[in-house]
Structures are given as structure tokens and as C-alpha cells.
Image (spheres, helix red, strand yellow):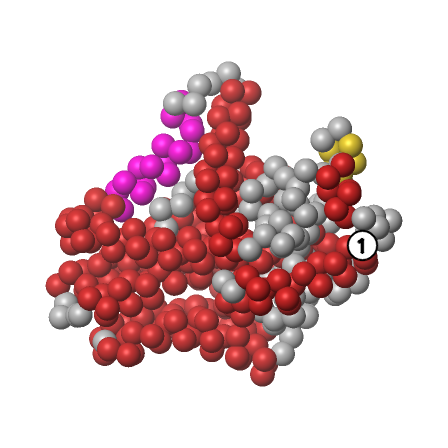
């Protein structure tokens, strides 16, 4: 064993392990109660964005040909996260069931858990669902089931990556579409499109939707099992608290989805065809701390270029190749919840993006109406 090399690899991976601090903060806030229950909120929504301001950008690129053996410490955190989150979710339900908390404290604690399930757990699930290893994909399904959103895997792999930037992708936020209109649309559209995609795949194999290979059976089984555990711990109130934290998690997920592709469209080529997905079709952010926290999710263009590329190997693009957000995802998702502010910040950037990458299209209203049914 090459010990100096192993130590160096561990040192390089450690910054990405900062997500474990969220579980520490959760435990501290649960123990102290009261206003301490805001610790997770402050860390996720404010502190990480503030640290990005001081720490600056992170633009270095690892060698994309790095072998998996050299990524052991990077992969380990994604493998251990599911059991840790599983324990945390049901420990929180036990705490609010048997602990001496006021109702607002119970809500605050389960909301904290939902923020972790969404801003950390689903990010890890996203990394895992793209890998070839069955163990990793099972872990990803488990994490999505803790958010009661198992079908997201089908939608993400079969619909989003294929149709991003087109009207066929419910997750691509349309230009001038506020988040509060986007959210109910994507909840319905994501479920419909994921079901249709899986049903279509089965039909091509001459199988009916109820065949055992339909992953929706797995999603339902996992989610049902987790709801039963919540009921066993806390009765109907336990189920309610579980659903509440899952709802917060999905809210967090869809805020990120909203930000990632807002207003960016692939050029329509006619006959229902679109240009290939390019780096210019995702918003990126090179901020250091939030990229550690989000497993380089903000290098989103490279993820769409190589979906199975592990997170430490994702490449940074400059603004000549891909559009850049003015702030990191934690800050931009907060702005997304205030549509007038969001549009004031982002709509001029979408228009600049159009002029930069599609100067030949001078009238986008007419273009969208005539060739591309995606609302402008």
C-alpha cells in the first residue's frame, strides 16, 4: 500500500465530507432545543453562501481519467450516507414522539431533517443513481424513498437527461416562469413522464406495466416500508412528520432543478428534433464551499456531458462555454422563492445568453411560437 499517496487522497476528499457536519448540527439542535433548532437552517441557507463569498471560486480540474480505486475516499462518503440519514430520520421521529418538545420545536426539528434529506441526501442519491454499481443504485433509491420521491430516478435518467432544454422535459424551468408556478407543474409532470418512460421501456420488451421489472414496484415498496417504520415509532403523527420532512426535501430538490436550467433551451431543428445537449444548456457556479457541500453539482454542464462521471472528476467550464450564475446554488435557490427578485437578476442573463449562443435568432417570441412550443 502506498501510504503517502493514500493520505494525500484522503486529504483531497475530506472537504467533501463537510456534509457530515449537518448531522452534527442536527444532533446539537435536537439536544439543546429552542432557538438552537435553527442551526441547520442557518448553516444551509446562509452560512454556506456567506463562506462562498469569502472563499471565492474553485476552478481546478481533476484528471477525468482517474481510476475508481483512487477515488475510494470520495466514494465512501456517498456509500455511508444512506444508513446515516436513515438513522437520523427515524431518530428525529422518535425524538418528536417521546421528547419534551413544543409543537413549534417538533416542526423545526423535522424541517431541519427535511433540509438535510433534500439538500444533502438527494444530492447523494443523484450521484449514486448515475453509477453502474447495483449497490450504489440501491443506496440512491433508498435515499429517494426517504423523500417519498422514488420516481425521480426514472424521470431523471430517462427523461431529463434526454430532453433537457425542450418542452418534453418537465424539469426545465421556462423563461419568465416563477418558481411557485413551476413547482406544482413539475410535481405532476415528473410523475407522469417517469411513469410513461418506464411503461414505454417495458412495452418495447413486450411487457405490461405491472411486470415485476417495473422499478415503480421498488419505489412503492421502499416508501411503504419507511412509512410503516414511521407509524411503528410515532403512530399517525409519526407518519405525518415523515411526510413533512419529505415535502421539505422535495421542495429543496425542485428549487435546485429550477435554478439549473432556467430559461435555457436547445435549438429546435424541425420535425420534433433538437440540437444535442451542450455545455451552454446548464447554469454553472464555481463557488468553492458550496461545490464541496453539493458534490460539485454546480459543475452541471459537465454532468450533462458525462452523466456517469463521478463527482470529483467533473470539469469546470468558463463563461465562454457555459453560462455562469452570479452566486452559488444556496443563494440562488433562496432568490428563486421570491419571483420578482429572481426575474430581475436572471432574466437579463437569459437574454444575454440568447445573444451569446444564438445570435441568429433575433425574435425569440416568434421563434418559440413558430418552431418551439416551449413558453417564452
Which residue lies under the disc numbered 1? 357
Q: Is residue 212 magenta?
A: yes
Secondary structure beneath dot 1 equals: helix
Q: Is residue 140 left or right of residue 105?
A: right
Residue 362: within the magenta? no
**Furthest-right residue in view?**
360
Identified at 21% across, 44% down, the residue is 228
Q: How many marks?
A: 1
Residue drawn at (77%, 43%) of the image? 366
The residue at the point 39 percent across, 71 percent down is 41
Residue lying furthest bottom: 54
Magenta span dominant secondary structure: helix
Q: Quadrant of residue 331?
A: bottom right
Badge 1: how crowded within 10 Å, few (<14), some, or many (20+)?
some
The region drawn magenta spans 211-226
Q: Is residue 352 above or below residue 147?
A: below
Percent coordinates x, y for residue 257 in the rendering: 54, 53
Q: Image quarter for residue 167? A: top right
Residue 86 is left or right of residue 103, and the answer is right
Question: Residue 135, can we see it?
Answer: no
Residue 222 left/right relative to 63: left
Amino acid at each position: 500500500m502506498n501510504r503517502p499517496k493514500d493520505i494525500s487522497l484522503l486529504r483531497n476528499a475530506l472537504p467533501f465530507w463537510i456534509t457530515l457536519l449537518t448531522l452534527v448540527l442536527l444532533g446539537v439542535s435536537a439536544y439543546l432545543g429552542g432557538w438552537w433548532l435553527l442551526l441547520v437552517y442557518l448553516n444551509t441557507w446562509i452560512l454556506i453562501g456567506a463562506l462562498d463569498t469569502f472563499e471565492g471560486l474553485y476552478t481546478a480540474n481533476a484528471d477525468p481519467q482517474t481510476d475508481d480505486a483512487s477515488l475510494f475516499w470520495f466514494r465512501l462518503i456517498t456509500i455511508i450516507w444512506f444508513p446515516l440519514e436513515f438513522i437520523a430520520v427515524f431518530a428525529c421521529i422518535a425524538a418528536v414522539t417521546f421528547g419534551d418538545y413544543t409543537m413549534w420545536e417538533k416542526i423545526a426539528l423535522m424541517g431541519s431533517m427535511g433540509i438535510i434529506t433534500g439538500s444533502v441526501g438527494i444530492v447523494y442519491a443523484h450521484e449514486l443513481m448515475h453509477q453502474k454499481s447495483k449497490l450504489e443504485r440501491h443506496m440512491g433509491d433508498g435515499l429517494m424513498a426517504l423523500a417519498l420521491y422514488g420516481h425521480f430516478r426514472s424521470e431523471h435518467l430517462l427523461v431529463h437527461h434526454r430532453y433537457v432544454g425542450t418542452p418534453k422535459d418537465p424539469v426545465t424551468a421556462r423563461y419568465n416562469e416563477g418558481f411557485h408556478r413551476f413547482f406544482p407543474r413539475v410535481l405532476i409532470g415528473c410523475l407522469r413522464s417517469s411513469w410513461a418512460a418506464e411503461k414505454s421501456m417495458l412495452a418495447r420488451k413486450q411487457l405490461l406495466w405491472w411486470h415485476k421489472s417495473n422499478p415503480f414496484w421498488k419505489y412503492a415498496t421502499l416508501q411503504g416500508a419507511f412509512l410503516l417504520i414511521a407509524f411503528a415509532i410515532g403512530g399517525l403523527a409519526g407518519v405525518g412528520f415523515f411526510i413533512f420532512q419529505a415535502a421539505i426535501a422535495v421542495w429543496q430538490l425542485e428549487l435546485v432543478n429550477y435554478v439549473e436550467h432556467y430559461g435555457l433551451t436547445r435549438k429546435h431543428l424541425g420535425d420534433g428534433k433538437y440540437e444535442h445537449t451542450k455545455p451552454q444548456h446548464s447554469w454553472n457556479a464555481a463557488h468553492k464551499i458550496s461545490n464541496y457541500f453539493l458534490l460539485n453539482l454546480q459543475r452541471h454542464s459537465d454532468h450533462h456531458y458525462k452523466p456517469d462521471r463521478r463527482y470529483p472528476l467533473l470539469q469546470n467550464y468558463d463563461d465562454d462555454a457555459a453560462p455562469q450564475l452570479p452566486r452559488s446554488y444556496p443563494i440562488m435557490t433562496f432568490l428563486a422563492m421570491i419571483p420578482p427578485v429572481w426575474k430581475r437578476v436572471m432574466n437579463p442573463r437569459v437574454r444575454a445568453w440568447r445573444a451569446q449562443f444564438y445570435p441568429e435568432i433575433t425574435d425569440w417570441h416568434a421563434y418559440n411560437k413558430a418552431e418551439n412550443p416551449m413558453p417564452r
